[in-house]
Amino acid sequence: MYDFLLGFMLVLSIFIIIVVAMQPTKTQSASNAFLGGASQLFGKQKARGFEAVLIKTTIVCIVLFFVLALALTRFF
């Protein structure tokens, strides 16, 4: 059981890395972060379509990852 959960956690961690890497960037370039691109950063822009699905998938996977990590440390 421990090996199965550990293997699932490994696959889940790789999936999280892929999902996070697929998400689009919010700024045009790295210089916007230092030169006043903060107005766009805190603006009310709601994620739509594929981006919203990626955000929800990331949240679910990270919560599942932490639940598995707590279960592995608590029960094994």
Image (tube, rainbow, N blue to C red):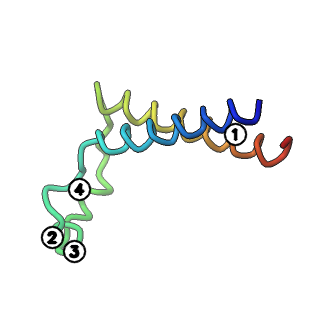
For image coordinates 24% across by 61% down, the residue present is 39
Residue corresponding to mark 2: 31
Amino acid type for the residue under numbered disc 4: Gln
Q: Earlier in the sequence, mark 2 or mark 4?
A: 2
Q: CA distance from mark 2 to mark 4?
A: 13 Å
Is 51 placed above or below 25 here?
above
Is label 3 in a helix, a strand or a loop? helix
Q: CA distance from mark 4 to mark 1?
A: 34 Å
Is label 1 in a helix, a strand or a loop? helix
Q: CA distance from mark 3 to mark 1?
A: 36 Å
Amino acid type for the residue under numbered disc 3: Phe
Residue corresponding to mark 4: 40
Q: Earlier in the sequence, mark 3 or mark 1?
A: 3
Amino acid type for the residue under numbered disc 1: Val
Q: Nearer the viewer, residue 63 or 40?
A: 63
Q: Nearer the viewer, residue 38 or 34?
A: 34
Q: CA distance from mark 2 to mark 3?
A: 5 Å
